Amino acid sequence: ADQGFRLEGFDGPPAVITSIEQLMDDDQASKWTTSVALTPKQCMRMFLQRLPASEFMTHFLDLHSVGNSGFANNSKYVEQPRPSSGLLVVETQEIILLQCIEKLAGFLDACRKVSVPQQWIGSSVMLAFDSVADFTREVLSQGDITRVHIFDWGRSELNTPTKHEMLSEEEQAERQKYWGYYCGGGARLLYDC
């Protein structure tokens, strides 16, 4: 089985994702499905889950319409020109992407150094940055403006060397398989970024 990652959603999606959601809310979703009746929410979830990282990272870095975030909706920055920081949007995007790549690489390196395989099934990785802030060149190059967090441990288990030794060979092999899936999914996300 091919394991990896999938996009579950955006907090403050860019305009292109919002427009797709509106299409699905306008009963267009029923025209796209033939054998199974899906709600617009189910269609949108299916659409997002099938986006390759190269495409969802493009949407993640989209700074054209920052007014869609919850923060921006309550902010003085909405629909006002961004103060001039001397940076082009593409420079901001490059630094944000570089910081995400560095943090994902550090996380993956830490995962590969774990002494025994873990069984982290269905846990999530979040990539985030403040799309409204107008960062200066100094802040972007020296600061820590992105976040990469892992969460959602409902079906996961923390394995220790002592506990791992007490497992049967079959259970150890299962942990190794799922840890390989997890690390492989993380490596694929890192590569696609």
Image (spheres, rainbow, N blue to C red):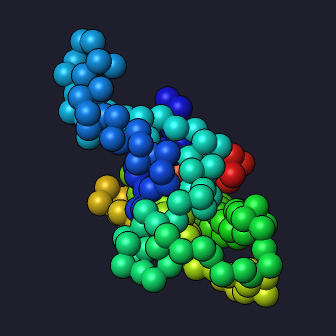
Q: In this view, does 182 lie above or below 32?
A: below
Query: How many numbered markers are drawn?
Result: 0
At a point 58% along the width and 38% down the height, the residue shown is: 52
Residue lying farthest to the front in this orientation = 80
Do we see residue 116 in this rendering? Answer: no
Relative horizontal placement of residue 70, taking residue 113 as reference (left or right): left
Q: Is residue 26 above or below residue 139?
A: above
Q: Quadrant of residue 136?
A: bottom right
- Residue 94 placed where, x, y %? 76, 63
At a point 55% along the width and 70% down the height, the residue shown is: 131
Q: Is residue 54 above or below residue 107?
A: above
- Residue 104 placed where, x, y %? 65, 63
At a point 72% along the width and 65% down the height, the residue shown is: 89
At a point 29% along the width and 26% down the height, the residue shown is: 28
Is 39 in front, or is 66? 66
Do we see residue 26 in this rendering? Answer: yes
Relative horizontal placement of residue 21, taking residue 130 as reference (left or right): left
Relative horizontal placement of residue 78, taking residue 74 as reference (left or right): right
Is 65 in front, or is 49? 65
- Residue 31 placed where, x, y %? 29, 18
- Residue 183 placed where, x, y %? 59, 52
Is 102 in front, or is 183? 102
